[in-house]
Image (tube, rainbow, N blue to C red):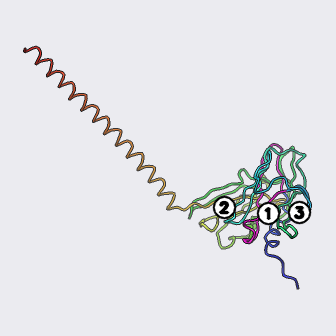
Amino acid sequence: HTRMDPLMLLFLLIAGLTVSVQRRESVTIPCFYDDRYKTLVKYWCRGRNVSSCPPIVHSDSPQDGKVSIRDDPHQPVFTVTINNLTVGDSDFYSCGVKILGDVDVGDQVYLSVTDGSPELSVDKQEVTGVEGDSVSIQCRYGNSDSLKLWCKIGGSCASERSVSLDGRPVLIRDDTVNKIVSVTMRGLKRKDTGWYWCDAGGWQIPVHITTLLFKSTILFSSLVQLALYVGLGLLVLLLIIIIITWKVQDKHSEYLLMQTINK
């Protein structure tokens, strides 16, 4: 029995990712890798074979025209963003990690760019919530009677019949009339920050959720208010000093004028 490389296991989490995007729009694709490859070069190329397709963009030269790559070794994940998509961009692509002296590793993504509405889409791929609060995502789909899923990359999947995802309360509702799957995650925690995806009819769309610390949010708001109050107080104090100085000078000028008249 051969043990699968952990990196390949991670890449297999997005293996067969099939994304539909409307022309002129943008899309961001996450590519995960093992901790031991944090310092290595990551790249994005057009083609199914990660070992032979020439890189379009790589992490030590992070932008080429409308394609950019950002490596976050702390996650560890690198993301590829393609802007102003055209129908001609439809193809298989590969996420890759350059391994010196060995075969590169990675897996493929199929990108379909359409003139009409995409097969599966979200309003925003980046969603922010506050710790302890809820966050909602709406996934719009085309003609699909298949089971709709909400999955966490590196975790499990939930359907409309589910009540939780990796221990987090989740509510999934499929509006078949308007063709919208609504996902609500409740009681957010910091560990919920990460990449998820909607799945409908064999199509997927990645969504990144960021959970902000509630205390940090309150502290930041309080500091902003304090700065405004201090600034306003200093302004009032400055005005008072100016008025007092003006009145003293006026009185002094009046005194000097009276002295001159008396002489």
- Per the image, the residue denoted by label 3 is 50
- Give the CA separation, mark 1 to mark 2: 14 Å
For residue 155, say whether it is visible.
Answer: no
Q: Which mark is nearer the camera, 1 or 3? A: 3
Which circle marks residue 237 in the picture? none
Task: For label 3, count other residues whose C-alpha is less than 10 Å away and answer few (under 14), some (14-19) or many (20+).
Answer: many
Which circle marks residue 184 in the picture? 2
Point out the tag, 1 or 3, that comes first from the N-terminus: 3
- Per the image, the residue denoted by label 1 is 148
- Give the CA separation, mark 2 to mark 3: 36 Å
The reply to whether callout 1 and callout 2 are in contact (CB within 8 Å) is no
**Secondary structure of the residue carrying numbered label 1:** loop
122 w.r.t. 99: above or below: above
- Give the CA separation, mark 1 to mark 3: 30 Å
- Say which amino acid is labelled 2: Thr
Q: Position of residue 179 (x, y in %)?
A: 79, 53
Check if residue 10 falls in the magenta segment.
Answer: no
Point out the tag, 2 or 3, that comes first from the N-terminus: 3
> Which segment is the magenta one?
19-44
Point out the tag, 1 or 2, that comes first from the N-terminus: 1
- Say which amino acid is labelled 1: Lys
